[in-house]
Image: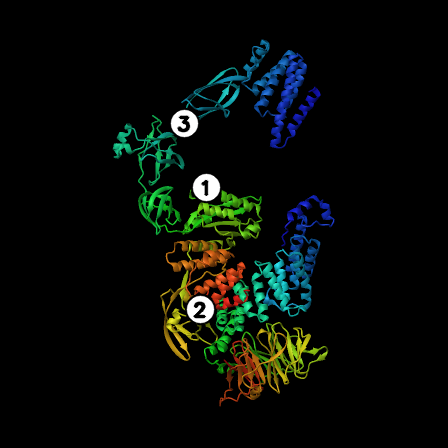
Amino acid sequence: MNRLAAGCLLASAFASAGTAAQEIAEEEDLLDRVRDMRIVLNMGAVAFEELDFARSVRDLSRILDPYSSGRLEPRSSEEIEVLARALEFRGRAFFNLGRTDRTDQDFARLIRLDVRYRLDRERISPKVIARWDAVRAGIVGILTVHVEPIGAELFVDDQVAELGPHLEKDLLAGSHRIRISKEGFAPFETNVEVIADEVVRVTAALERNARDVRFFTIPSGVEVVVDGISLGVTSGMAAPEFQEMAARIGIDRARISAPFLVPNLSPGPHKVHFAKDCFAASTARIEVVLDREGDAVQDFRPVVLEPSQADLAIRTTAGGSIRMDGKEMGEAPRQMTQLCAGPRWIEVRLENGLRWFDRIDLQAGTSREVTADPRLTLVYLGIYSRQRDGAVRVAAKGGLAADLRETGGFNLILPSEASSYRSEQTAAFIQSRVAETLSRADPEIWNRAGPIGAPVLKRAREELGADLLLLGTRSSGGAGEEMNLFLYETGLPAPDRITLTGKGEGKQIKAFLTQLAGTRDLFTTWFGATTAGVSTQEGLVVLRVTEGGPAAAAGIRPGDEISAVDDRPIGTHREWIQRLRDARPGDSLRLRVEREGKSLDLSVRLARTPRLLPGNRPDLLYTKMIAEFRLRARTAAASAEKNLLRLNLALAYLRFGEFEKAIEDGFRQAQLARGAGISFGTVQYYLGVSYRNLGNQSRAREALRRAAAESDATLETHDGPLVSLRAARLLKETP
Amino acid sequence: MQRHPHRSLKAGICFLVPLAILLMGNPLRGAPAEDRFAERLFKNGISLIRAGNQEHALQTFDELSRGFPNSPLADDALYRSGTLFYPASGLRSLHRAGRDSIARAIPYFQRIQEEYTYSDTAPLALYKMALLALESRNPGRSLDEAFARFSRLLALYPDSPVTDRALLGTAHVQSRMGECGQAMNHLDRLLERFPESAASTGALALSASCQADLEQWVPAMESLQELIDAQGNSLEGSQARRFLTLIYRTRFLPSLGRQVPLVRDTAFETETSKAGMRSCRGLAVGGNGRVYAGDPRQSFLWSFQEGGQPIGKSARPGGIRWVGLRGGEGILTGNRGAVHRKTGVHALDRKGTPLLGIESVAISEDGTIFVLDSREEKIFLFDGNLAYQDELLPPGEGRPVKIRNGPRRHLFLLTEAPSGLFRREADGGWREIPLEVEMTETRPIDFAVDGVGNLYLLSRRGGPVLVFHPGGKLLVRLEMPSDPDRPRLIPGSLAVGPEGTIYLCGRKSDRIVRFR
């Protein structure tokens, strides 16, 4: 590198240093500057070695002048080191040029820059060394500090000086601030005036401002939390030296833990919490008092934790093995006593291959009983929302998760409770796949169709034993913000979607949870006749009487007018229907009936009729119905109930256009007898409809023909629309 | 908004093309810049509609659909434009659009069908096209075409937002074609799949009507009761209750071997007598139960509440000879040579020749006005604007005296000398109804048809009112009461209410007599 280039380099380095604006740029400039300064320093040193002192002074001045003019301040140790070396060389160059005044100036600058800087006394001329010593003696003094106790930290002008009982340190003449500190002692601070070429001595004896304390617990193994900070767990057994203390409190020393030392606790009140599994936690307020004389350890009376236990009885109708927090606990039904109180994860693996599990909070001193009958397993994945940057976030804690836990009624698997998963990998897989799908897809699509594919559902079913999968999506920002809940039955790709609007979202979620946890009643009250309100009659006229039903048994006929029920006017048709809904099978109603000018008093004893799942109601969770009906059909004892469950299961499948499943899992399994009401004809009609949709016209015709022949079979309930009329109409259109 | 299967490709190509080309008015299709511009235009159009500036909105939408045919909003712009001309959204809003509007709307919807078959407006446009095929003022109206369009919609877009309405539309067309059995299958599907949709109300009503047509009276009544339970006392609920009552009285009770109850309603009679009528010619009863009576002596039209309480009178200059009900649009009255409208008295003319022997008027559901001219002995058809459309020749040898509309768009005609009662069939031919009672015995002077097609004949000179089943079987013979305290009732006009209630009045009546 030639001189010109070096000069340009240096100039540009300094220029850029002066104008750098941003921090990163400044750091880069600094590195460049130090590098360039070293180059120039070497040039100055070479000139010095070649005895070209004037050139050496010129070169080195290029480094030093910006600093002496105040344009630059050294910012790094490397920079200080280069400057120090430059000052040394220039001072010595000045000396060789006979300009000792400038030598003194550079040496003084050098010492102020780094008071610890030393010249190489063996290589440098004694005259220069003498000059250096003279300059140094004029501006540097010595500080010695003696501290008790040992181990204190010493700061001079807020810089860490040293740790130890004694300190001897060169300092520039002038005022300096001394600070000494040690944990458990009051800090020491003073200002000292250092005089050039003299020794200044400081002695500091630190005073104790805290005290070591000790806790004892019965039993040992108790977590000690002081002022909210967990400090550890007590252990071991109290040594013989504590025999007297044990005797004083009347407790066997062997039961007392070894002392738990908490050093340097500040004087005054403290809150100490003691906790151990299966024991009732205890909180104590202590007062720490300083011992200025002896600095003795302050011992506190042993803390006794009482055992915290509860009883739990698990009942089942299907037997099964019980696991608590992963440990085998025997066979159900079982009464378990003296269990540790607190939240416990109970799982019952039922004999029929089904599972029941729940997190149960056992309250100390109580006896709890749970019935672990088979129920649905629901996996809740959280509420997903897509951010503006396209990233998908999931909120799986609190909110709906807490509501689900509180609602109960199903085996609940929450991602926030990893232990509840059989496999954490599965949970991670499902969540990542959902997030991935959501990050790719158009929000409109996942808000409409749902974000889960068949592989995810399959894994949830196979690896988590999930029947239902629930997640939410929330569109971010904008006026059209909405939240959708998607409920999947893990054997079906289509979900139920519940759209929640901002207004009344809480109510909607409550209604959703009620339905999710509830069980659909397969039956409703049966009157056995249809009625209508006509303008010209006060009461309700009877249109159709179902054969074998309660109304027929009471002697009611078509054309009768029911004017009063239990001596009160019957009211509107809606009121009458509501009255029947509110009544229970077995209730009796006294009816006033007008028939061809005569009044009759008839008594009807209400019975019950199957109530089929309606085809498409936005307020029903069909996926949940599928899971529920399948489970109930599997565990139902009575075949009549099983048949009805199979029929309802098939109807739930129809909601999703799953005709094959409806036929195979439902209609074919539902063996209903011939007769009036919900019966063989009902099943045949739906079978015909399903075959028609599958394009199997010949089977559709067969089924519809059978349905059309069942003149008294009905849909919906025993009093519902007649199957035969619909079947006959549909038959005409089935080629 | 349409969906482009190759949007990303288009976007990629457009990315490479200089922006300058876009700015030079040569927009590349599907480009983001184009989409943004199209979106601005679309929003502009919507704002203009909101501000009531339809003309400029139309221009804006046209600009969008012409200038940016591949924009995701091009189909929306076409749909909006078409909808500006044809806003009907269902069967209930049919027959309100004018001929010009219909003609201008069709190309927009057609273009969506042809160029944006897979857009989300395609099913909506096809639905509009199906409705347009049912419009009475559409020269190209055709039940077959409407059926084809509804069917196509259901086949191509089975889960569109208008599937429920398309099912109802299909059933509606089938019922009009006389295929109620097939219509019921569509209605069952609708009620099963969309039980809570807005179309379910119409489905229940049509279902009841079809079941009545199929003579399945009990299911019809059950459907009507379901509709009443859902609708309460709304217009639909009240209409359903009246229809239910009609079926109960005239079908259900006779099916049990019981008489159709018809009792003179003296309270109603007393109420109507308070109005101040001095004569009565021409009676009509609305679907809401209101009663209208012409008073030729005073040239008034009287109207009464369902219970007989007078509502008021309105002047009918030039005299009043007949009263006709116009579905949803109020009452139409007139004399032998003119029609009273809100805007005054209008002469009816057939290609410049005035009609001077108007004897009776019937107005169909689609707004077609049938005018019987006794001088010309013809029935002339006019549209809602009283523009001449067509003419029909009455059948038989007798002189035509009265025409009435019945359910399923049947037109009925009463002739005298010799007396005969005829029904015009869907194929345009007339069929004489073989009444169980000889017409020569009664020589009816007026008649009415109720919602299930029962025929009510008013005999001459105080003779009985005979109620016949649509096939001609006698259901009821209602003799005129002879009350010594009242003048003998010699009615000259007859009307039937939606519940099968009979209304009568005579030339000199100061009241209306009702039997229910």
Q: Which residue is mark 2?
A: A712
- Pair 3/2: label in front: 2
Vertical placement of A243 versus B162: above or below?
Answer: above
Quarter of the view holding residue A672: bottom left
Q: Secondary structure at mark 2?
A: loop
Same chain for labels 3 and 2? Say yes or no: yes
Locate residue A148, reporting x and y percent. Answer: 41, 22
Same chain for labels 1 and 3? Say yes or no: yes
Quarter of the view holding residue A326: top left
Residue found at the very far top of the displayed protein: A126
Vertical placement of B319 versus A260: above or below?
Answer: below
Vertical placement of B190 versus A203: above or below?
Answer: below
Identify the amino acid type marked 3.
Phe
Q: Secondary structure at mark 3?
A: loop
Vertical placement of B357 versus A569: above or below?
Answer: below
Choose the circle earlier in sequence order: 3 or 2: 3
Tell me the subunit letter for badge 3. A
Q: Which residue is mark 3?
A: A185
Q: Which residue is mark 1?
A: A424
Q: Are marks 1 and 3 in contact (CB under 8 Å)?
A: no
